[in-house]
Amino acid sequence: MEEENSVTINDLMKRMAEFARERDWDQFHSPRNLLLALVGEVGELLEIFQWKGEVPSGLPDSNKDEKEHLGEELSDVLLYLVRLSDICGVDLGKAALRKLELKCSRNQISINLFDRGLFSFIPWV
Ligand SMILES: Nc1ccn([C@H]2C[C@H](O)[C@@H](COP(=O)(O)OP(=O)(O)OP(=O)(O)O)O2)c(=O)n1
């Protein structure tokens, strides 16, 4: 890790691998188990927002403890996702970048078609 502020997906991946190895938990970190754990943590994250209605960006009404709790649940989701990707042999950083680029080029095609009036026959576009 170069600086405290620039944590990479690779750093997290290595730390999670170390964490599991130290506890002899590799045996439990199968793709299916990790996916179940990930979804469980998404549920814990969801509970923070449940029944609150719309929450403004930046969460100005949350106190320090609530923000800290949110950070913990977001981290659990991220850590299980990183670990799941690693165990499945997927380079998550590369895959995510590729996905974003694909999305951008797809959107660019739509924008180009739109600019050229090719969607003009669709009343709601
Ligand atoms: N078999 C396990 C169990 C936990 N963890 C790691 C990944 C998560 O970052 C964190 C989740 O730990 P807990 O399941 O204990 O969940 P919490 O820390 O959220 O505890 P609680 O559910 O009581 O809030 O620990 C892991 O890698 N493998």
Image (tube, rainbow, N blue to C red):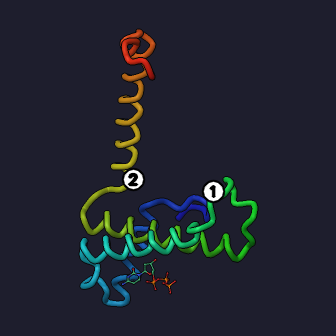
Image coordinates of residue 47 in percent, x first then y, are: 53, 72
Instruction: Compare residues 7 and 50 and report the one nearer the observer.
Output: 50
In the displayed orientation, state which residue is furthest to the bottom. 23
Circle 2: residue type: Gly
The quarter in which the C terminus is drawn is top left
Which residue is pictured at 35% across the width and 70% down the height?
83
Mark carried by residue 54:
1
Image coordinates of residue 59 in percent, x first then y, are: 69, 60
Question: Does ligand 1 reach within 8 Å of label 2's beta carbon?
Answer: no
Per the image, label 1 sits on a secondary structure element best described as loop
Location of residue 12 with respect to 113 vertically, above or below: below
Q: Earlier in the sequence, mark 1 or mark 2?
A: 1
Please tell me in which quadrant of the rendered image residue 6 appears. bottom right
Q: Quadrant of ligand 1?
A: bottom left
Which residue is pictured at 61% across the width and 75% down the height?
69
Say which residue label 2 marks: 93
Circle 1: residue type: Glu
Which residue is pictured at 31% across the width and 89% down the height?
24
In the rendered view, does 120 fall on the left or right side of 32? right
